[in-house]
């Protein structure tokens, strides 16, 4: 794990589970509570105590264990979930999918993974979507960041299968309109499928505020491809990614799709000085063409989420340079191919990563899926 020099972080072992929670105090903690930790949630079977180890990064850039304790849990059961926003990076193998669960019960799904890697995605949805939301849907909002197969084909394979009688009740689908002619047919078919399944189609514009419920402020940082269609960047579908910042209380989360550096630079120019976030979904699966130091510094994330599959190691993903940049800028990096922060190229424990916040403090829970590593 990593931490800012001199600022401790805690590793909390959950009894009887392989999962681990990492928690640290919010930056705006009052002076008399600085250094305290806010653990917001824990498994229902954990009723007595938690084993806690506290680490700190020294001036030598090495991580040192500075204490260990057994902390008693005061007040059982845990606080009721309506106060929490939960944002889960779903382990879908090679692909991208995230679920936002708001305090009022609204569900927002961001991308749907790849057509040929739907098993884990489908199991996750079955576990999560058994009850309809207050809006009357199983999924209120579905965001498709761009039309690459590892982001959208779960829409066809799982959600709207078949189109006219979908497996899940989806309220609205947000698309970032592609500029690439070769994607026009795909986009037209997807729109038709979604509409025949009873969902509303929405095409947001850059600068729009999205309605994901009264507790959230959602700002579209990019929609569509801002480059000339015939240019080098205009023919890259990654640069059509829908990029947005979701805010709950004092906690911001930025989702980037596969936006590459030229698009990110445009976003930085449009929203200069207003891009800070505690949580960053790292662009393009940790590729070096998507995360430069200037971007990581602007965002200043403390949690960096990298959706990745073991098979992508042949493409050198995630890039060591990107992971090092994120560490240097103070982020703890969580990868779905290895839910052990700081473990480089370790793929024996895959899983979902759940960020839990009350709008002030932040906690992260890793949930092993024990999916066999890819060959």
Image (tube, rainbow, N blue to C red):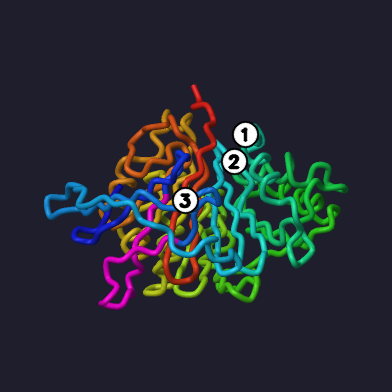
> Between marks 2 and 1, how big is the CA–CA gap?
9 Å
Asked if disc 1 and disc 3 are in contact, CB closer than 8 Å, the reply is no
Q: Nearer the viewer, residue 181 or 370?
A: 370
Looking at the rendered image, the disc whose residue lies closer to the viewer, 3 or 2, is 3
Asked if residue 113 lies in the magenta stretch, the reply is: no
- Work out whether 203 lies above or below 290: below
Asked if disc 2 and disc 1 are in contact, CB closer than 8 Å, the reply is yes
Task: Residue 71: give x, y in percent of width and height.
Answer: 35, 56
Task: Residue 219: give x, y in percent of width and height.
Answer: 55, 71
Looking at the rendered image, the disc whose residue lies closer to the viewer, 2 or 1, is 1
| Residue bearing the label numbered 3 | 365
Q: Secondary structure at mark 3?
A: strand
Q: Nearer the viewer, residue 80 or 266?
A: 80
Task: Residue 84: give x, y in percent of width and height.
Answer: 55, 66
Q: Is residue 73 visible?
A: yes
Considering the whole magenta stretch, tell me its main secondary structure: loop
What is the crowding at mark 1: few (fewer than 14 residues within 10 Å), some, or many (at least 20)? some
> Between marks 1 and 3, how big is the CA–CA gap?
23 Å
| Residue bearing the label numbered 2 | 150
| Residue bearing the label numbered 1 | 117
| Mark 1 or 3, nearer chain start | 1
- Work out whether 182 lies above or below 134: above
What is the crowding at mark 3: few (fewer than 14 residues within 10 Å), some, or many (at least 20)? many
**Residue found 68% across the figure and 60% down from its top:** 174
Q: Secondary structure at mark 1?
A: helix
Magenta residues, as a range? 21-39
């Amino acid at each position: 794990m990593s931490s800012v020099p001199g600022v401790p972080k805690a590793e909390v072992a959950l009894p009887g589970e392989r999962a681990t929670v990492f928690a640290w105090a919010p930056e705006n903690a009052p002076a008399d509570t600085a250094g305290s930790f806010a653990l917001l949630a824990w498994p229902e079977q954990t009723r007595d105590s938690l084993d806690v180890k506290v680490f700190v990064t020294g001036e030598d850039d090495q991580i040192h264990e500075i204490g260990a304790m057994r902390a008693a849990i005061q007040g059982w059961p845990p606080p009721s979930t309506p106060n929490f926003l939960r944002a889960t990076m779903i382990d879908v193998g090679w692909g991208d999918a995230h679920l936002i669960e708001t305090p009022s019960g609204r569900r927002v799904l961001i991308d749907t993974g790849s057509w040929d890697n739907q098993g884990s995605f489908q199991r996750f949805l079955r576990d999560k979507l058994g009850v309809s939301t207050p809006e009357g849907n199983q999924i209120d909002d579905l965001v498709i960041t761009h039309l690459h197969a590892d982001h959208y084909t779960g829409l066809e394979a799982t959600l709207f299968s078949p189109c006219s009688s979908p497996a899940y009740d989806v309220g609205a689908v947000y698309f970032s309109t592609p500029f690439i002619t070769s994607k026009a047919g795909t986009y037209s078919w997807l729109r038709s499928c979604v509409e025949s399944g009873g969902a509303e189609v929405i095409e947001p514009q850059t600068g729009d505020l999205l309605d994901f419920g009264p507790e959230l402020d959602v700002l579209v940082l990019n929609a569509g491809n801002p480059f000339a269609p015939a240019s080098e960047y205009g023919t890259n579908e990654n640069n059509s990614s829908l990029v947005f910042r979701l805010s709950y209380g004092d906690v911001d989360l930025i989702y980037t799709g596969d936006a590459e550096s030229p698009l990110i630079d445009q976003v930085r120019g449009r929203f200069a000085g207003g891009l800070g976030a505690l949580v960053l979904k790292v662009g393009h699966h940790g590729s070096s063409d998507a995360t430069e130091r200037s971007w990581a510094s602007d965002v200043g994330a403390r949690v960096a989420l990298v959706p990745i599959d073991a098979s992508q190691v042949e493409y050198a993903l995630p890039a060591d340079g990107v992971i090092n940049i994120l560490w240097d800028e103070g982020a703890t990096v969580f990868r779905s191919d290895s839910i052990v922060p700081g473990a480089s190229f370790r793929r024996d424990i895959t899983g979902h990563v759940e960020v839990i916040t009350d709008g002030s403090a932040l906690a992260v829970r890793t949930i092993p899926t024990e999916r066999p590593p890819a060959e």
